[in-house]
Image (spheres, helix red, strand yellow):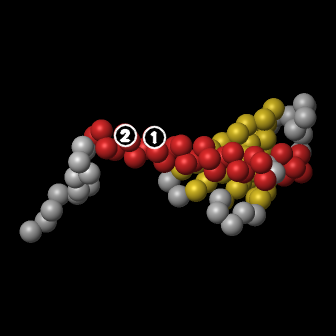
Amino acid sequence: MRIAGYIDHPVLKITIFQMENKLSVKLESGLFEQTYKFRTGGQVNTVEDIRRLVDDDFIAEALQEMGRMRSIRVRALERLAPGGEEEFEEIM
């Protein structure tokens, strides 16, 4: 797999990867990432196709999904440590 390009965005790091008969686009924000993979030979064949695919609507939906991912993480951590206890032991 090799990095085939980047898409500039003020909030997300967006990287395009190419490997054999696949193109992937990875969106990263802090601790969260999403990767979408596409086989070449259909509608997506080039890096430019990925750039057209990752439009404002795609990014808006990905950001919404990252919000849901954050919520899942917060709820899971709450179940692990009810009451919002400190993550680390207090050192005296």
Mark 2 residue crowding within 10 angstroms, few (<14) / some (14–19) / many (20+): few
x and y, in percent, of residue 64 in the image: 62, 47
The quadrant the C terminus occupies is bottom left
Label 1, secondary structure: give it. Answer: helix
- Which amino acid lies under the numbered mark 1 shown in the image of this protein? Ile
Left or right: residue 85 compared with residue 47: left
- On screen, residue 3 versus residue 34, left or right, reads right
**Residue 81 in the image: x percent, y percent?**
25, 44
Kindly tell me whether residue 26 is visible in this rendering: no
- Disc 2 is placed on an element classified as helix
Q: Amino acid at mark 2?
A: Ala
Residue 85 visible in rendering:
yes
Residue 20: x %, y % from top left: 80, 37
**At x 78% / y 53%, what residue is drawn?**
56
Quadrant placement of the N terminus: top right
**Mark carried by residue 87:** none
Marks 2 and 1: in contact by CB < 8 Å? Answer: yes
Q: How many marks do you count on the picture?
A: 2
What residue is drawn where x is 22% and y is 52%?
85
Mark seen at residue 72: 1
**Residue at image location 28% in from the left, 40% down from the top:** 80
In the rendered image, the vertical position of residue 10 relative to residue 86, given as above or below: below
Mark 1 → mark 2, Cα distance in angstroms: 6 Å
Left or right: 45 as drawn, with respect to 65? right
Along the viewing direction, whichever of 79 and 47 lies nearer the viewer: 79
Residue at image coords 48%, 48%? 70
Q: Nearer the viewer, residue 60 or 50?
A: 60
Residue at the disc numbered 2: 76
